[in-house]
Amino acid sequence: PAFGAGDGVKPSYAYTAELGLLESLARPRNYHKKAVAGKTLNSITLPTGEDGETVDAGALAALRTDKAAEGRRVRAAEVDEVKSLHHQGIKAAEAASGLAGLKRVADNRKARHDATVERYRDERTAVYARVEDNVLAASTRIKEELATADERIAKIFARLNDDDDLVQRSLEYVHESWEDVEAACRSRTARVDAFATTLEKLEDERADTVGAKLRGMVKDLVNIAHDLPPTIERLAEQEAYEVNLVTISNRRDYADLVARLRRDDVKVFHASRRRWELRLKAWRLLKHNRAIAGYRDLLNGDTYRNPPARAAKLRELMAAQRRRHEEQRLPLLKSLQDMVPPNLASEKVEALKHEFEELDTREQSENADKFREAEAAQTDATEEARRELERLRSEVHEYAALAPEGAFKRMQAALEPLVASE
């Protein structure tokens, strides 16, 4: 600092030397002057000491600035600046130049900067926790929905696996059962697709929300201006990198989970189809066996072996024979028995013989008629059995339980040239 005449303070040697140097530099310089006898050329005014005496020219070197000391001062200032950085926990000593206010402003900015970063990270953690809860809820829901669909399929097959009930059902019932199974499988697939969409939306929500909060943090940090924009940009890149890592990892896990669910869903569909085809074959075989058993019962029963119509004709024949025997033959035999002398006569015997012959003729004629009627009844039963056989043939062809797969392609290849030639 400058000192005035009225300050009452005697100037230091350094100050006096500096003033003399400045005055010397301010005077015009004349080069190539010749020395004049008895005079001193290019002289300068030497500073005076505290005692008023002029400082000797040899002592001026002590007043010069020490370069080593100046270097130490600069290094000390740089150390103070380094210690004031945010990653140092050491508070630099306040400069003697009166910068305490600026230091407080810098500390306040640093505190706001750190609080903003910490708030962003807390909000990011909260978003992650909320999304994870939603993912867990969606996973629990899809698990319950798939269990419900599987239970529905199991109930349908429980009915189809009951042979006693299945043999009473029609082919339409079996096909309707497959439609129910297919609807359950479609519902199962829709649940898996909805779950995949839910996971995609949740991950998009996570990325959008965290991205918005990261942009807000960057905006706040720029406004706080504790760090320079490049430093804030590097911090934002690091945070975005971590968010992207989480997003990529989650999407990979979600894709793997959905792929396994869809693979299992395809397995359930094909397994259900194979089970239904087995039950369709079982239905065909059950119907086939029941039809065969029914026809065998017809052949082994009285309907064929002793047709009711034939049995009725035979009963009528037996009744007529018994009635004829009791009403006609026995009286004739009684008359013949009573023919003893003197009542025995050739004419009477001949008459009885004629009556016996007529009775026998009528009986044979009636017996022949009844036998023809009985044979007709047997023929009708045989024809009915044959008609039943044809119905059985048609029925078992409809069931196709034992039929091998038709060679339709081979037959088509053989018939096409013939049809084209016509």
Image: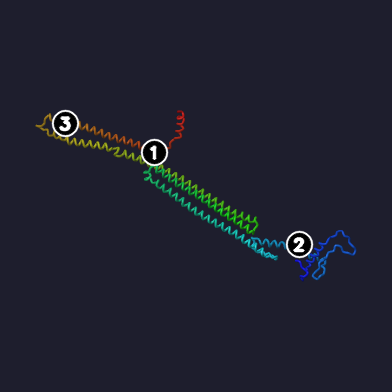
- Compared across the picture, whether 418 is left or right of 289 comes to right
Tell me if 148 is positioned left or right of 256 in this view. left
At 72% from the left and 62% from the top, the residue drawn is 74
Q: Which mark is drawn over residue 355?
A: 3
Q: Amino acid at mark 1?
A: Glu
Location of residue 392 with respect to 224 vertically, above or below: above
The residue at 12%/29% (across/down) is 347
Q: Which quadrant of the structure image shows residue 374?
A: top left
Picture coordinates of residue 280 (x, y %)? 41, 42
Q: Quadrant of the N terminus?
A: bottom right
Closer to the chain start, of discs 1 and 3, is 3
Question: Which percent across, then down, holds residue 58?
Answer: 82, 65
Q: Which residue is mark 2?
A: 67
Q: Which residue position holds label 1?
A: 398
Distance, label 1 to label 2, CA atoms, is 117 Å
Residue type at the position of mark 2: Lys
Spot occupied by residue 147 in the image (x, y as percentages of width and height): 45, 51
**Camera-nearest residue between 233 and 317:** 233
Q: Are marks 3 and 2 in contact (CB under 8 Å)?
A: no
Q: Answer with mark 1 or mark 2, whichever residue precedes in sequence.
A: 2
Residues packed near mark 2 inside 10 Å, few (<14), some (14 to 19) or many (20 plus): few
Q: Residue at x 61, y 55 (%)?
A: 236
In this view, the residue in front, 174 or 267, is 174
